Image (cartoon, grey):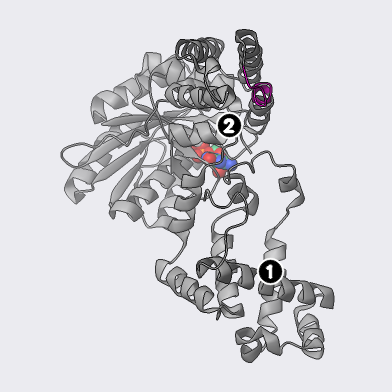
Amino acid sequence: MAFENLTSRIQTAMKNLSGKGKVSESDLDDTLRQIRLALLEADVNLQTARNFIRKVRQEALGSKVLEGLNPSEQVIKIVNEQLTEMMGQEAVPLNKSAKIPTVIMMAGLQGAGKTTTVAKLANRLKENEHARPLLIAADVYRPAAIEQLKTLGDQLQIEVFDKGTDIDPRQIVKDGLKKADQDKNDYVFIDTAGRLQIDQTLMQELKDLEQIAKPDEILLTVDAMTGQNATETADGFNKSLGITGVVLTKLDGDTRGGAALSIREVTGKPIKFVGEGEKVSDIDVFYPDRMASRILGMGDVLSLIERTQKDVDEKKAAEQLQKLQENTFDFNDFLEQLKQIQNMGPMEDILKMIPGMANNPALSQIQVGPKDFSHMEAIVYSMTPAERVDPDLINPSRRRRIAAGAGRPVVDVNRMIKQFKQMREMMHKFTSGKGSLPAGMEQM
Ligand code: GDP
């Protein structure tokens, strides 16, 4: 998961300040020196790291926070604000043309995730706006690229325009745009060719395509895993082509995070989206403030809530809440919840969005994999309908039968039933207002 090291290094640096009633200028400088090193190790651009430290120092000394109450908290607040500013402050939406189609030209090095991103973005527009995008396959140098785009288009039921690989991409784009005009598509995505590195031929081709397509948006895809190179690539493309935004991919990987922090400052262009997995739904708007919180280990509660909301059927959720309040939540509801949780993605990623969890050593102990879910499901499926509705029916001999049916040891069945009852009890208490949330959960 991205940012792990950076988060723990910054937290350690901050610990220097906390617990001190008064913070001296030299304490502050000590902490800032550690943060600067942490940023450099995370592959943040050198100049960006320097500017950042200078601004935090200026703010901290200028606003005299060191003399006030809770100086360490104030410094964290300043660091948070400056991180947010460095990444561009606000989320920046896709440019949209006043008349259809909005043309989005993609650019990027080979393997950065361009083709995948085209599918993710087009699908997002289709789902969110009922858009009818057309994808133009103009990467004629990598034959597999066209096939890949066509396969994705088939899966998502999004139309792909292609003319094979024996034709100049300039002509493909001209013809594709003509088709989009005829068919009144509202968005056009142009999937262009990549190279292993920036070269003149590639840049000339992209410039020509830009002249032809007059795109509303030139989105550069860069791979977060490539660290400093990602920032340099963005800088290079921006200087020769002029981009309007960046999609930072593979943020789900073990990246140190430098690209997310440096690209805006170095290129002046916003990161608009981040890719966080290989699935089509693994794309999110880039919110600088949420990213800053995540880097500081303060969690990303807003994204967690959005993710939960996106995947949860609201009517069902309301029904389940009512059942919890009435204490009639049963194993059928439990099954439903298991399914919803699995749809949300890897458990580990979800837990990390909770404040304070990102670097919690306990997290490495929690391993809820797809297997655990299927074991729990198997146990519920081995219950009779009556047992699912009334878990109190499940006596020891029934437990043995259920265990045999699910192919699990009886202890697993016992444990699950016990946990289910505890959970139901706890949820009942606080959904009916009779209890308080466990410490730390209140913030959520
Ligand atoms: P292109 O050459 O730039 O068109 O790159 P592709 O779209 O073919 O992607 C290259 C590889 O990166 C593929 O295996 C993708 O599945 C993978 N990929 C793309 N975006 C992401 C992402 O956000 N996370 C992860 N983990 N993999 C990604």
| Residue type indicated by callout 2 | Leu
The residue wearing badge 1 is 374
425 relative to 313 in the view: left or right: right
Question: Of helix, strand and loop, which one carries label 2?
Answer: loop
Displayed-image quarter of ligand 1: top right
How far apart are the alpha carbons under marks 2 and 1?
34 Å
- Disc on the earlier residue, 2 or 1: 2
Q: Residues within 10 Å of mark 2 (few under 14, many from 20)?
A: many
Q: Is residue 86 magenta?
A: no
Disc sitting over residue 403 in the figure? none
Segment colored magenta: 13-22
Question: Where on the picture, by quarter, is residue 93?
Answer: top left
Q: Position of residue 389 (x, y in %)?
A: 60, 86
Q: Residue at x 54, y 30 (%)?
A: 223
Image quarter (top left, top right, bottom left or bottom right) of the N terminus:
top right
Above or below, comparing residue 139 to residue 342 in the picture: above
Above or below, comparing residue 429 to residue 276 in the picture: below
Q: Residue at x 15, y 40 (%)?
A: 99
Question: Of helix, strand and loop, which one carries label 1?
Answer: helix
Q: Residues within 10 Å of mark 1 (few under 14, many from 20)?
A: some
Mark 2 Cβ and ligand 1 under 8 Å apart: no
> Magenta region's main secondary structure?
loop
| Residue type indicated by callout 1 | Ser
Question: Where on the picture, by quarter, is residue 31?
Answer: top right
Q: Is residue 19 magenta?
A: yes
Choose mark 2 or mark 1, whichever is in front.
Answer: 2
The residue wearing badge 2 is 296
Q: Is residue 143 something that shows in the picture? A: no
